[in-house]
Amino acid sequence: MSLADQDEVLIGAALEGSARAWERLVKRYEGRVYNFSLRLTGNQTDALDLMQEVFLGVYRNLHRFRGDSLFTTWLFRIAHNKAVDMNRCRRLFMQQDQPGGNADGDDADPYDRVVSNDPRQDPAVVLIEEQGNSVISRHLESLSWDQRLIVELKVFQSHTFEEIAELQDIPANTAKTRFYTALRKLKSILEQDHVM
């Protein structure tokens, strides 16, 4: 049975009230949604908040999934919309009040930040993976929000420029321009990192 077929079975069971099917559906995609969220937000707290919003949105709208596209396409459309909403709210909040301090607590034990979706997974492996995500996030933070979102959709979610254009309601050429501008900026940042 293909992943799409398995998703369809889980969705059907979840819609009929099976908490176990819903849990399996969430577990199947929570790692990908978390990584998507972390790359866009740049910190674990916001990534977890965004991931929660995404799955709440999926839960509330699961009855609207018609199967016209893959479940992952539909899921990441919701993730995209929630990320845009979160960024909009964050910008409004930043305009009203400039918060100080670091909410992430840089002095905390790095193992405390590890989020493992699989209790059998080695915490050291999870930590190394998160540190890799941290490096990627640090570089992505240097991009504008629009560029970061384009890179996320193109590189990490493997969308075509046409799909990105549809998601963001922009022309495909604008999506291409933003993507290649972002790549040039990332290349410049990586070159500076290696020089230092």
Image (cartoon, rainbow, N blue to C red):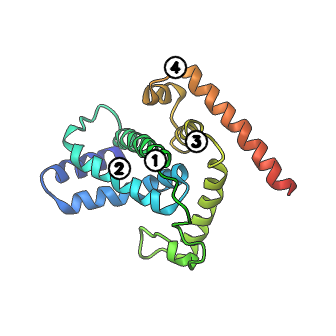
Front: mark 1 or 3: 1
Q: CA distance from mark 2 to mark 1?
A: 26 Å
Q: Which residue is mark 3?
A: 148
The numbered mark, 2 or 3, whose residue comes first in the sequence reads 2
Q: Which residue is mark 4?
A: 171
Q: Please, what is the three-letter code of the amino acid marked with disc 2?
A: Val
Front position in the image: 113 or 96: 96
Q: Please, what is the three-letter code of the amino acid marked with disc 3?
A: Arg
Q: Please, what is the three-letter code of the amino acid marked with disc 4?
A: Pro
Q: CA distance from mark 4 to mark 1?
A: 32 Å
Q: Which residue is mark 2?
A: 54
Q: CA distance from mark 4 to mark 2?
A: 26 Å
Q: Please, what is the three-letter code of the amino acid marked with disc 1?
A: Gln
- Relative placement, left or right, of 134 versus 104 is right
Provide the secondary structure element on which disc 2 rests: helix
Residue 171 % position (x, y) = 52, 20
Provide the secondary structure element on which disc 1 rests: helix
The numbered mark, 1 or 3, whose residue comes first in the sequence reads 1
- Relative placement, left or right, of 88 versus 133 is left
Which quarter of the figure has residue 65?
top left
Q: CA distance from mark 2 to mark 3?
A: 18 Å
Q: Residue at x 18, y 42 (%)?
A: 63
Q: Which mark is residue 96?
A: 1
Residue 118 % position (x, y) = 42, 70
The numbered mark, 4 or 1, whose residue comes first in the sequence reads 1
The numbered mark, 2 or 1, whose residue comes first in the sequence reads 2
